[in-house]
Image: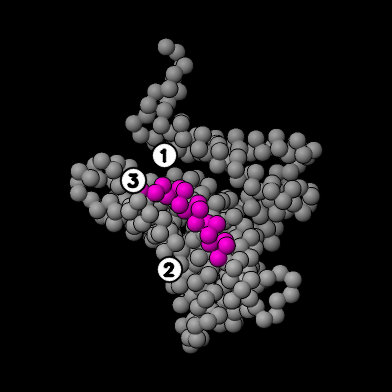
Amino acid sequence: MRLEPLAHASPWRMLGVTLAALGLAFVLVGGVFVAYGQNPLEVYRLMFTGTLLEARGWQEILRRSIPLLLIGVGLTLAFRTQFYNIGAEGQLLLGVVLAAGVALFLPLPAPLSLPAMVLAGALGGALWCGLAAWLRLRFSVNEILSTLMLNYVAQSLVIFLINGPWRGKDVRGYIYSDRFAEYQQIPLWPGSSVHWPTLLLGVLLALLLQFLLFRTTLGFRMRIVGENPGAARYLGLPQDRVLLLLALITGGMAGLAGVGEIAGIHHRLIEPSQLSSGYGFTAIIVAWLARGHPALVLLTAPLMGLVLAGGDLLKVSLNMPFRIVDVFSGVILFCLIGSELFLRYRLRWGR
């Protein structure tokens, strides 16, 4: 038995390897359920029927999918060009901070307030990711480390603001800011928590960035910079500018996700753990599943939305630990990373 290098993995091979990795992840997580004293088949039955067969379950899947879609599309673009942005959680929070600042302190006419919040949120995420890109270009700082550390800076900033200068006048118990005005809130699908304008924006951006990546000169430059930096240098492509633009796009997408959460659901600045259920980290799995194609995030984001919604159901129905969703997500990511070997090599039997 030996490994033989593959020049190129076909789409069918990528699909088969990805499905096999997901299947293995579900088997391994089933072992966790057994260790907890639960029948894994019964757990999965409850997880899928409680979400896919009920209207409320679908609403919860869609609500969880919206931030995963926006962040995942940006991360797919980043990973395709070898910019490993692990800081989408912090970029989401910076988008939230700037959007909340506009809502609370910038006196704008009602029709302009929400659009200004959206622009400010995208700008906040873009600048936070752009900082990491600048550190890489100027000082050769690894973006994995810088984006990861900036997550904690963003969390501390939010906590400082709601405990200090932005603390709400009517605070009782939990710490939060004042509530946004009605005209600063994103409309919801009737009877649900699904902020449909953000969902529609995510779908449009996924299709737009798919077109950008595979049908434009800029997209060709991005793919060359990521797949073959030596060829990019030989062709004289402006790698620094491409990288910086890419960082602004992926960070801006995370910032937009933050605007959707704060203006569509919470309507005030609250603690970071309540603002985001680890969407920035879960979106890494969403992007990895998409295998470098932004449009495929339209499928992978709802898949992880199902995992998040189903995990919440298991916590309530079976009294499972709060971190069961994190275990699920971690095992999926571990299996996906391990499956990369079979996209680069073919297993041969014999001598």
Which label sits on residue 11? 1
Which quadrant would residue 62 be assigned to in this image? bottom right
Q: Secondary structure at mark 3?
A: helix
Of labels 1 and 2, earlier in sequence is 1
| Marks 1 and 3 close (CB-CB < 8 Å) | no
Q: What's the residue type where badge 1 is placed?
A: Pro
Nearer to us of marks 1 and 2 is: 2
Which x, y percent locates residue 103? 53, 79
* Mark 3 lies on residue: 226
* Mark 2 lies on residue: 123
Which x, y percent locates residue 139? 35, 51
Which x, y percent locates residue 241? 29, 57
Q: For the point 49% across and 61% down, which residue is it?
A: 91
The number of numbered discs placed on residues in the rendered structure image is: 3
Q: Is residue 94 above or below residue 297?
A: below
Q: For the point 66% across and 48% down, which residue is it?
A: 325
First to last magenta residue range: 140-157
Q: What's the residue type where badge 3 is placed?
A: Gly
Which x, y percent locates residue 341? 46, 31
Q: In the rendered structure, does residue 84 fall within the stretch colored magenta? A: no
